Image: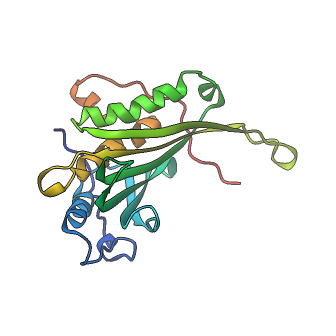
Amino acid sequence: MAAAQGQRSDGAGEMESTEGKVAESAPLPFRAAVEALRGARLRPEIEIDPTKPPKRLAPHAYALEAAVVEGDEDLADGRLVLLHDPAGHDAWQGTFRLVTLVRAELEPEMAADPLLPEVCWSWLTGALQARGLACGEPSGTVTRAGSHYFGGLSERTPASQIEIRASWTPREGAGGVPDTASHLAAWCDLLCQIAGLPPVSQSHGEGSVVSLPQRRGPQTP
């Protein structure tokens, strides 16, 4: 299985942050899954931090937010949440669930491509498959949104955004713990791809993946 490259996901100070703490009373499989997330090695373009997890989706949750940064420009950003219910969940068909939001700005003409939603969904499933990861009960949406500016904002270029919301059940390994580090690496592969960055494997001649060109960072009002 290919290893992620670049920085660790537990950058300086993250282990002691309020959002990054996990209660000692949490189940051992959940704590092990979170430790694997913290120890994952990611591409250097990824900036990642723990964030406040949702409280009502599962008895135990851990969340990360990330951005693909090139220079001073954010090319894409997202959020990944690890949920755990020791009793299992009928809809998940397992005790763990990964939930994600990924979004990026793109040129309006690219957003008009009728095949864009199917392509973006295939990037998610392809990123998981490329790392040999099995998942169950995948579901999600791909949304395109466009903005046109008028009046005092009329000089701004029309903007379009692609957004992927998805969830899946990771296969549990030894001790009931999924390979969350590899799932995080695959998710970061998706984040980089939607940002328009070439996959790391291209530098080694291991094939290519089509990415959306003409990416630009989120605009401020």
Q: Quadrant of the C terminus?
A: bottom right
Give the mark count.
0
Residue 133 appears left or right of 99: left
Q: Position of residue 11 (x, y in %)?
A: 31, 65
Q: Position of residue 132 (x, y in %)?
A: 21, 35
Position of 56 relative to 120 (above/below): below
Q: Quadrant of the N terminus?
A: top left
Residue 68 in view (yes/no): no
Position of 121 relative to 153 (above/below): above
Position of 48 relative to 90 (above/below): below
Position of 68 relative to 123 (above/below): below
Residue 117 appears left or right of 139: right
- Display coloring: rainbow
213, 63: nearer the viewer: 63
Query: What residue do we see at 23% from left, 59% from top?
Result: 33
Displayed quadrant of residue 206:
top left
167, 193: nearer the viewer: 167
Query: What residue do we see at 27% from left, 22% from top?
Result: 207
Q: Position of residue 116 (x, y in %)?
A: 54, 26
Query: What residue do we see at 72% from left, 37% from top?
Result: 158
173, 110: nearer the viewer: 173
Query: What residue do we see at 11% from left, 53% from top?
Result: 174
Residue 183 in view (yes/no): yes
Residue lying at the far right in this picture: please name it: 151
